[in-house]
Amino acid sequence: MANGALRLPPGFRFRPTDQELVVHYLRRKAFSAPLPADVIPEINLAICDPWDLPGETEGERYFFYRRNAKCSKHRAGAIESHSGYWKAAGKDKLVVVPGSKEVVGVKKALVFHQGKPHRGIPTRWIMHEFCLATCNSRRMKYSLHRCSGEIKEWVVCRIFKKRAKKLMEAAGGSTLPNTASSSSSSCVTDNISPEEGDEGSSICIN
C-alpha cells in the first residue's frame, strides 16, 4: 500500500466477501490483531469526497474509519463531507458466517448525494458499510457489549461508482450469488472481470 492506495501485482484484485471483510479484517482491526495483509487504509469520510479517495477510480475500494461525533450522524440520516453527504438506502443486512447461523456483523448501503443534507442530488457513488455485531442488533449471537467504545467505533467500507442502470439495485443492497470461499484466505484473486457489488452471506433485517 502506497500513499493510502492499494498496490497489488498486475492481474490481481482484492475481492473479499462480506464475511471475510468482517471476520478477517474489521474484527482484527478493532481488536488490534495482525491483519492478513496491509491492503485497507484508514480514512476520514468527513473530509473526503468519494472522487478524492485514494486508489483507482474504477472498481471497488476499501477503507477503515472510525465513527467520530460527525461521522456517527449517519445513524440519524447521513455522513457529511465537503461536497455532500452519504445517505442510507434500503434495509440493513446481517452478515452471517456461511454454513452456520453465527452473525458477525451488519451491512448498510449508502448513496452519495451532492449538495446540502435533505436537498442533495443522488450520484452513482455507492458505499457498503460494515460494522461488528452488537448486543443491540436483532438476532445477534456475536456480542460486543463488553467491549470498549473504541472497538465499536471501527467500521470498514466498500466504495464504488455504479453504472447508471445498476444504481437502484446497489442502493437496495441486493446480493450476488456467493462464489467465494469461506475459509481464511487472503481475499486476493486473479479474477479481473467480476461485477462490482455485494458478495458473501447476508440476510435482511426485518
Image (cartoon, rainbow, N blue to C red):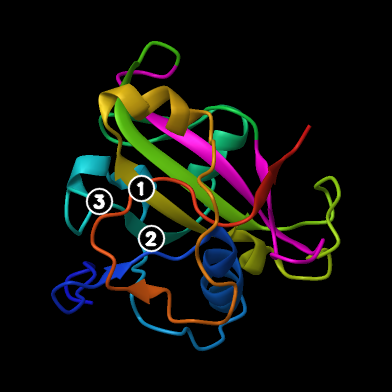
Q: Please name the amino acid that badge 1 sits on.
A: Ile
As for residue 98 lying within the magenta part, the answer is yes
What residue is disc 2 on?
63
From the viewer's perspective, is 46 left or right of 4? Answer: right
Residue 108, located in which quarter of the rendered image?
top right
* Residue 143, quarter of picture: bottom right
Q: Is residue 88 left or right of residue 93?
A: left
- On screen, 190 above or below 185? above
Q: CA distance from mark 1 to mark 2?
A: 8 Å
Q: In the rendered structure, which segment of residues is drawn in magenta? A: 92-117
Report which residue position mark 3 lands on.
59
Q: How many marks?
A: 3
Residue 199 % position (x, y)? 50, 53
Residue at 73 percent of width and 58 percent of height: 133
Q: Secondary structure at mark 3?
A: loop
Q: Are marks 3 and 2 in contact (CB under 8 Å)?
A: no
User: Where is 198 relative to 4, above or below?
Assistant: above
Looking at the picture, does residue 10 appear above or below residue 17? Answer: below
Are the residues at dot 1 and dot 2 in contact (C-beta closer than 8 Å)?
A: yes
Q: CA distance from mark 1 to mark 3?
A: 9 Å
